[in-house]
Image (cartoon, rainbow, N blue to C red):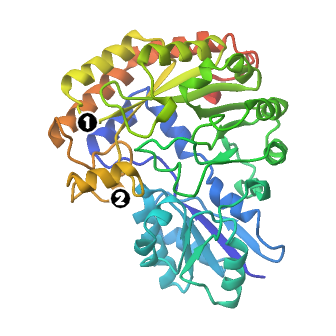
Amino acid sequence: MPHVALVPFTGFRVREDEVLALGMTLPGLKPRAAAVAQLPALGLLTLAGLNPPHWTCSYHEATRADEALADVVMQHRPAVVALSALTASVEEAYRFSALLRARGARTVLGGLHATACPDEARGYCDAVVIGDGEPVWPQLLADAERGELRPVYRAAVPFDLAGAPVPRFDLLGRGPRPRFTVQTQRGCPLACEFCGASRLLGPYRSKPVANVARELDALRALDPRPVLELADDNTFAGRDAGELLDVLGAADARYFTEVDWRAGEVPGLPAKLAASGCVQVLVGIESLCFRHPGMGPKQAELPRIMAALEAIQGAGVAVIGCFIVGGDGETHDSLDRLAEFIASGTLADVQLTLQTPFPGTALRRRLEREGRLLPNRGWSHCTLFDLTYRPDAMSVGELESAFRDLARRVFGASESARRGAIRRRVWQTNPRLRPCDPEHSASS
């Protein structure tokens, strides 16, 4: 029987040594890094749900190109090896592809980076999938079985999520997982300049709740009360939340997702979020000094945003406020104001990232036009924590140093403990959290 090996490159990646050291030592950065590192690769697991019955399949999570892993993969004598990687790890995926091809394997790469840079990816793999993978996966496997892979596979139309299969969660094995991933939509109705995901795979689409319910049933077979991360760009932004919240609530799961602040202004929605098992949301406040283009109705004055976030936390759902550092106009003074704003605020947690011009984004196109991309910072620097462009009001070194200083102030022991106490107070009012639930299961 033909075999397909699935190899996702996962993990938390940082290139800059001092930022990496901070991530290892600052208590406020550790939990999220650990959670991200262990998230399953939902894209490949979903494609595996479309495998014909006569195909066998294996799943191999990787953090780097490794000769030993290449040997393990080749033991299955795969007809094709499917690789997935984000921009920060794509060069590692290219190296692993070379190891496999030297052993006679054929490799295919898809996802956001391959979709944005297909000509580049074709130089490292036997085939590239552009856009949604589901419509072309059966044909790709049929071609691989005959030994006739095409160099490019591209869906003729955006994939209808009503046809989405149940991901092959069984390939993850029976070992403990801090979180499972479930996708309820693809893309986002908004078009924020910096977003590397919202439009690259096609227009915004929501998954029917019946499909979501089937996926939750499959997860409950592995864990009766799973902890989930919804792999959505902006849950509830383009659909009526009611039916989806009912399905999530019936699963008796605790879950984390990303929403925009407007969820806090929808009458009754914060309470319904908490009642459905939502314990934490990440909300993009983005910047105190720069208004990113494309945010549409998400763009608002800070007091209104914070009032909406207070409503969400008042219902028992902790809010992670996400801030993007390094937009135009960023200075030492603006970063001091950000640190003071966070220290004086009531957010249950915080995420800080450096503005990152991912391929395919409007941000990258703008910075490229302006000649501001740094020539010596390749894809492996697109980690959200390494600077890849020249700021407009600071030097490269000044912004890198200021970002490290901000991280020390925001994620030091005392500030992390203060926000930890806020989270515990928020969760005391969440109707779906039980006294026996460990904090790390629900936290970032």
Q: How many marks?
A: 2
Q: Residue at x 83, y 43 (%)?
A: 213
Amino acid of disc 2: Trp
Residue 202 located left or right of residue 433: left
Q: Which mark is residue 379?
A: 2
Measured from the top left, where is residue 23 in percent x and y? 38, 36
The answer to whether mark 1 and mark 2 are in CB contact below 8 A is: no
Q: Is residue 43 above or below residue 56?
A: above
Please determine whether, in this image, residue 266 is positioned above or below residue 357. Answer: above
Nearest the camera: 194 or 297?
297
The quadrant in which the N terminus is found is bottom right
Give above or below for 190 relative to 99: above
Q: Which mark is residue 42?
A: none
Asked if one can make out residue 71 in the rendered structure from this viewpoint, the answer is yes
Q: Which residue is mark 1?
A: 328
What is the secondary structure assignment of the residue under circle 1? loop
Q: Residue at x 41, y 55 (%)?
A: 88
- Comparing 441 with 232, the one in front is 232
- Residue 28 position within the rendered picture, expressed as x and y whole percent measured from the top left: 44, 26
Q: Identify which residue, 331 or 253, lies in the foreground.
A: 331
